[in-house]
Amino acid sequence: MKLSPFLPLLAALAGSSVVDAKAVFAHFMVGNVRSFSQSDWERDIGVAQQTGIDAYALNVAAQDDSVDSSLAKAFAAADAKGFKLFFSFDYEGQGAWPSDRVVSLINTYKGRPSYYQQNGKPLVSTFEGPGSAGQWGSIKGSTGAFFVPDWDSLGPSGAVSAGGGVADGLFNWDSWPVGANDKNTNKDQDYKRALGSKPYMMGVSPWFFTNLPLWNKNWLWRGDDLWFDRWQQVLQLQPEFVEIITWNDWGESHYIAPLDSSQWGLFTSGQAPYNYVSDMPHDGWRQFLPYLIKQYKTGATSDTPSGNGAGLYHGSVPFNGRLGQVVVTITRNGNQIARVDGTSISTSCTNGITNWNAWVGGAWAGSGGGGGGGGGGGGGAQPTDVCVPGSGQGNFGGLCSFACHYGYCPAPCTCTARGAQVQPPPSTGLKGYPKVGVPDHCSYLGLCSFAWDRGYTDNLAACGSDPAGAAGC
């Protein structure tokens, strides 16, 4: 069975000024992007900047021979884009880091304009590595680092005291619920108590599913409402830092980056029985982050809308045995203002194995019109709060440019600006479908439908009139 799609539909949300004292990071797996050029890094960073992310925590493994080349391109790109980066040394995936290499990397890059500084010191983190805690006093002395490790395996009290209390703050990787329960904040509160006045970096993640036999990994942790719930907990707890787990860890299905097949080599090297990421975008989880990040940075402690006002609305609908395509719409005063055409719920599984990854879609809608192919109307319209230009990569380019111009800018398009609603062309009645054999064909479903219905049939490489192209979606 394919897992139920997640389909957040986004109403226009009021923004506010950002307070610099807090920051939101995204955990970035450097080992997945060995083929990236500097321009690839710049493109990827651009998406993160539009999302409101302040920096990438660069997960680097000790035995990865691509690290030096990747870091040179990453920092050049970040310098060019005005973005920030910092190191998260991975002591788990490929063993412990030699302390001299840690010192060398920090000192090589800490002076770059793009290296993230905390209290005038280069921020450094880890993924585990408590066995090397005793080395960090010397490393800090040689680099001046502000050290915020993830030593979650020790628990909050153990991590605070490790290495003689060498940590300047702590990162809590534990972002998923145990069993059939909601994620609570008990452990977050334990960290805050143990740290006292030291800063707390709170982990936030939308999902977790993995099936990589080479590393004996095959399990699911409960997702469901996790992304919504965890951000509400961020607003309540107001930690000094938030780290999203992750930007691009495809193997554990908690990515929020746009799909990128150039990064999927681990499904072969990890002996995965199938690729459980292909055709499974998570862009919808990213779409409302700018709003939530601003809420967090300005000290909002809750996001409970009232009286149909602006805010984040959340709900769920059970399967109850239903199969077929999922369509979610929002209407106002009888007019459809937003629509998402999701992938199908199906009993057909690749190799007969259930894919527990999530399909996540989204669409923009203005207060009074047009997103997702709906009509306008409705009181209190805000004339400058819909997507007006947008872009996409490859075959998505023309489709995204056309659709986003009229306020319909779903994943995998990127909205590049918001403005006054542009009235879409009238319906032609033409029905467009993804073209048979197009990679990631389900990602084209809503775009082909919207574009052809409004007379845009130029992108014949991706769309056609054959309904068979929607098979499996």
Image (cartoon, rainbow, N blue to C red):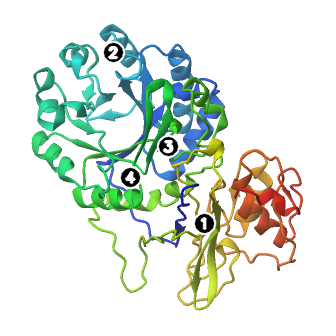
Report which residue position mark 4 lands on: 222
Q: Amino acid at mark 4?
A: Arg
Q: Residues within 10 Å of mark 1 (few under 14, many from 20)?
A: many
Q: Amino acid at mark 2?
A: Ala
Report which residue position mark 3 lands on: 253
Q: Note whether 255 is above or below 73 in the view shown.
A: below
SS at mark 2 in the image? loop
65 relative to 133 in the view: left or right: right
Please state the horizontal and vertical placement of residue 148, each as a whole percent of the image: 26, 32
SS at mark 4 in the image? loop
Pick whichever of labels 3 and 1 is earlier in the sequence: 3
Q: Say which quarter of the image contains residue 136.
A: top left
User: In the image, which is nearer the foreground, mark 3 or mark 1?
Assistant: 3
145 relative to 245 in the view: left or right: left
Pick whichever of labels 2 and 3 is earlier in the sequence: 2
User: In the image, which is nearer the foreground, mark 4 or mark 3?
Assistant: 4
Query: Answer yes or no: do the residues labelled 4 and 3 have beta carbons within 8 Å?
Result: no
**How far, Cα to Cα, is label 3 from label 1?**
22 Å
